[in-house]
Amino acid sequence: MTKQTGFQTARARYAAVFAVLLAAFAALIVWNINTGSVHVPVREIARILFTGAGDDTQVGIVWKLRMPRILAAAVLGGGLALSGFLMQTFFGNPIAGPFVLGISSGSKLCVALVMIVALRYFSFVSSWMLVLAAFAGALTAMAFVLLAARAIRQMSMLLVAGIMISYICSAVTEFLIAFAKDSDIVNLHSWSQGSFSGTKWSHVGVFSAIVLICLVLVFFMSKPIGAFQMGESYAQSMGVNVRRFRVALIFLSSLLAGCVTAFAGPISFVGIAVPHLIRLLLKTEKPILVIPASFLGGGVFCLFCDYIARTAFAPTDMPISTVTALFGAPVVIVMMIRRHRARL
Amino acid sequence: MNDAYFRTEGLTVGYNGKPLIRDIALGLRAGEILTLIGPNGSGKSTILKSITKHLSAIRGDAFIAGASVNAMNYKELSKKLAVVLTERLRGELLTCWDVVATGRYPYTNTLGLLQQEDRERIAAAMERVHAADLADKDFSAVSDGQRQRILLARAICQEPEILVLDEPTSFLDIRHKLELLGILRSMAKEKGITVILSLHEIDLAQKISDKILCVNGETISHFGTPDEIFREEIINRLYGMEKGSFNLTFGSVELPRPEGEPNIFVISGCGSGVRLFRRLQKAGLPFYAGILYENDVDLQVAAPLAARVITETPFFPIRDETYETALLLMKKCEAVVCAGVPIGESNRRLGDLIREAGALGLLKEEDALFSAAQP
């Protein structure tokens, strides 16, 4: 009977975590619409959202500025957490993530290159071009990381390799931006620091489609992901085609990381900190729970961080990574210390 | 070999396309236990990994009930073959129940949700390995013995026809070794599951296996029943044992015999000498032993350890010739120890030998040997 009660307490825990995440998600959306240079009362928000009626300035601000930005934080934050979770699964290490491995910076470099070239010669950049460039950049950076992983089998060295790739890509990006003497340089600069500001509705459609499709695909991969968490050999003995599965993991995590970078620039620590916090809350690693919870958690985390980035020094926007690092890095440090202790 | 349930044909295994062991041909009937023995690094694991498709075979193939393993995809294979690997099972925050539940993987739906039937199989598998009470325990916190049992339960609830285990008894104490092998034995005999495993403990291999495969690096030196394989020359050559020896009757191992000219003579019988022989070996003191009947259990240990053993044909009175030889050897020694032996009608003359030793003033207490040897 103890097993039965064990299952029940676990279920109650899972339900509670999801309830809290959903509540926080909803509350943060309202809060984000509510505050800013123009205050929108909570009572008005429902009216504006559901009927579109109300004070013209307020409707404009909510629909044109705040909603796209909120959706970007929610969806891209979720995508980032998901990408981190996939990379952690792939490398079998909780400290892997799109930012530390240099994947985000790889995308950033490619996107900057495409933007500058396209703006100069075609004076036009489509969202899809950016996504494609970001994806290509992410895959290229991933290829370098995998090469490094093959040469050095130590995880810490892999992270060092990732950080070096990240520095090189960032340096080249800054170099490119210095050459782009366009009016877009301001935009380009704030984007290369990572920010949800300036999100357009056309962007929302593109990244939502990509991220949500990836979410569904990843969710339906939760069974082989669970098997893979036990180690490659065991996964294979359970009937997983490991080679094909690894390709799928790389493809999806790079697409997610690239997509986020294309629209919001590189954002640090979300990919590591969120899945870790979620595992801690759920007290399980089961992908079928961790995947949706990480997605929600990533959204909550980024909504919260973007709120601070937006309001702390209003009207100046801070780069989102400044805030995510402030909250995410301590989580990572605590996690590393705890793991080290557990091993001793 | 045509009625074999599991067989390999010209299987050549190795890493990175370089063949390590060539042309492995073996056949097993359903419910048989095959044990791979051989020295460290001889390729036991390589063969097992090739059978489980963790390594692709360089040439040749394995067949389960006539179906080629090469042609099978991983999913099909996972319903026929389950493994217990030496590799640590990664994954965190898992209870033992969760780990066993992963064995149901090939049978669950797209999202991997467990049905009532799966839960029953999991519970039954845990019961089978006497681990039902571990269900709620954290997998990373259990002992080595418990961990192996949980991994075995995991393999069992995968409902395989073949179970492959790579050194499942490493790190286990003797009780858990016996327990684990006992479970394997009953799985094989009651459920007809074919078991392929590698073992370092050749004494246990001899007792549990139906077939033995000797692996010694480049080729399969022997394949056959334990009776065919467990011969002194085969085992000693397989392991390159020049020192020490393997006792075929008991499956026990003795360390090399002490070197030098003996000056100790041990009189014993009916098992009274075994402990003393081993104590002398440990102290590095060479010795003679006698007079032992050839069916005396003491002889099994005296033969590999004593510089020379004087023996006599069982059930016959000790002959003059034997007695004289023993007496001659005894007189060369400085000490004679009698470990205790019943004297009856046929071995009457052994009593004479003891009396003779006493008369010569050679008879010593056992402990005197060791205090003298270690001033």
Image (spheres, coloured by chain):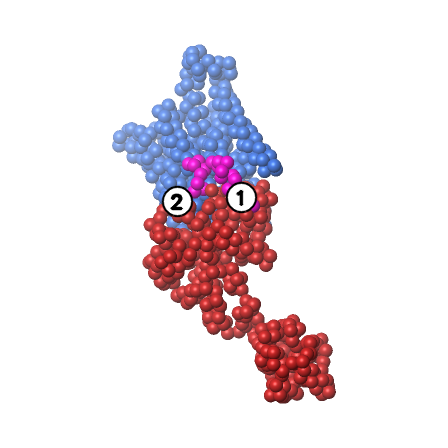
Chain colours: A blue, B red
Q: Chain letter of disc 1?
A: B
Residue B75 image label: 2
C-beta proximity under 8 Å, tags 1 and 2: no
Q: Is residue A305 above or below residue A153?
A: above
Q: Position of residue B111 (x, y in %)?
A: 44, 36
* Relative side of B363 to B228, left or right: right
Please identify the quarter of the rendering in which residue B132 is found: top right
Amino acid at circle 2: Lys
Viewer-closest of B261 and B37 = B37
Viewer-nearest residue: B188 or B72: B188
How many C-alpha atoms fall within 10 Å of the one at disc 1: few (<14), some, or many (≥20)?
some
Decide which of tag 1 and tag 2 comes sooner along the chain.
2
Q: Residue at x 51, y 63 (%)?
A: B206
Q: In this view of the protein, can residue B311 be seen by the observer?
A: no
The magenta span reads: B105-127
Which residue: 56% across, 57% down? B177
The residue carrying mark 1 is B124
